[in-house]
Amino acid sequence: GAHPIFIHPEFDETFGIAHGITPSAVERALALHPDTKAVLVINPTYFGVAGDLESIVKLSHSKGIPVLVDEAHGVHIAFHEDMPLSAMQAGADLAATSVHKLGGSLTGSSVLNVRRGLVSPDKVQAVLSMLTTTSTSYLLLASLDCARRHLAINGEAMNRRALELATRMRFGLAKLPYLAVFGESDLHSSATFAFDPTKVLVSVKGLGISGHLVEEFLREEHRIEVELSDLNNILVIITSGDSEETIDAFLHAMSLLVARYQNNGAETTDHSIVLPDIPALALSPRDAFYEETETIPLVDAVGRISAEFMMVYPPGIPIFIPGEMITADNLAYIKENIEAGLPVQGLEDHSLETIKVIQQSNAIR
């Protein structure tokens, strides 16, 4: 039943990606919406960039508002001083920390960290009990406990090893022309307050090719799998499970890529990213979910209220959600990503040709 108020993230024009939100943007949003019940922050982002979470927490707490953090890609950051602050270190009230992503537990296992005060652990437990199964998987619980113990004992050493390997990769990539690697020099605001160096974001825009093409090149010709690709970049995650051999294999593959496409940049259209504005919310997501819908061609959906989600995943930032007005800019952005071969998904129609929208008679009340 919540009515979400979205805060525009800071956009990085060099890499064509969204970062986090700034404390000043949160302050403006809270001033415009004094009845806010909670502030939800993604920190760090999929790309490893962290905002000034501590300031956001202090600002929200000064108004008695709890801060909830999606910490899907941050389970490891609390275990090394060269990493950004974790959500709980920054004072957050709730943090969903995906141990299975970078902490070593089995897929589908996660931890919900709770700070008593503005949030009641008892109420959190009651809601979880209402929404989740009573048939708990002890395999998942055991894997969480093993991963927690391993991080507590060896987390600092694991991070140190991963950071050393990431430095090796970054030095190697710096020697290759036409590539740009996100680093310390790209931290220039409270939305880019710190970053996780083990997330290596490489822009291939200078080669005049898409990140998706690079992902396929690495997979098909070198048996290397990257974390994600988008129109301009690939993202590589370095862990203590890597070695000098895996790093050097990647660098060798990237050198061959540069050699193949270095004369391509002037001939190929640049994928300049223009993120569409956040659509207007015409109905709450709950109301949109329960409304009567009709299925229409996606190309005819401008001006209609979506009854579905649509996103490029990864990273999974919605282009629009149920209840939002679909705009021409939305559809142009979707078309650009589809034509680049990127994983646009969310619609019930996997061909992406049709979409469910709110019936016209129910759209305006």
Image (cartoon, rainbow, N blue to C red):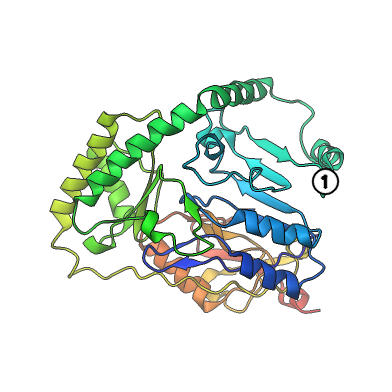
Depth check, front residue: 59 or 181: 59
Which corner quadrant holds the N terminus? bottom right
Measured along the vertical axis of the image, is residue 41 above or below residue 243? Answer: below
Give the residue at x 77% y 36%.
132
Q: Quadrant of residue 281?
A: bottom right
Say whether residue 351 is left or right of residue 256. Answer: right
- Give percent across and percent down for residue 101: 52, 36
Give the residue at x 35% y 30%.
242
- Give percent across and percent down for residue 153: 55, 22
Depth check, front residue: 218 or 7: 7
Which element carries disc 1, helix, strand or loop? loop
Depth check, front residue: 68 or 349: 68
Question: Is residue 289 in view from this perspective?
Answer: no
Where is mark 1, residue-wise? 117
Which corner quadrant holds the C terminus? bottom right
Say whether residue 226 is left or right of residue 343. Answer: left
Which amino acid lies under the numbered mark 1 shown in the image of this protein?
Answer: Gly
Question: Is residue 232 in view from this perspective?
Answer: yes
Give the residue at x 23% y 35%.
249
Give the residue at x 36% y 66%.
14
Say whether residue 56 is left or right of residue 196. Answer: right
Near mark 1 (Cα within 10 A), the count class, few <14, some 14-19 or many ≥20, is few
Measured along the vertical axis of the image, is residue 331 above or below residue 128? Answer: below
Q: Quadrant of residue 297?
A: bottom right
Depth check, front residue: 171 or 94: 171
Q: Quadrant of residue 272?
A: bottom left
Say whether residue 71 is left or right of residue 288. Answer: left
Measured along the vertical axis of the image, is residue 191 above or below residue 277? Answer: above
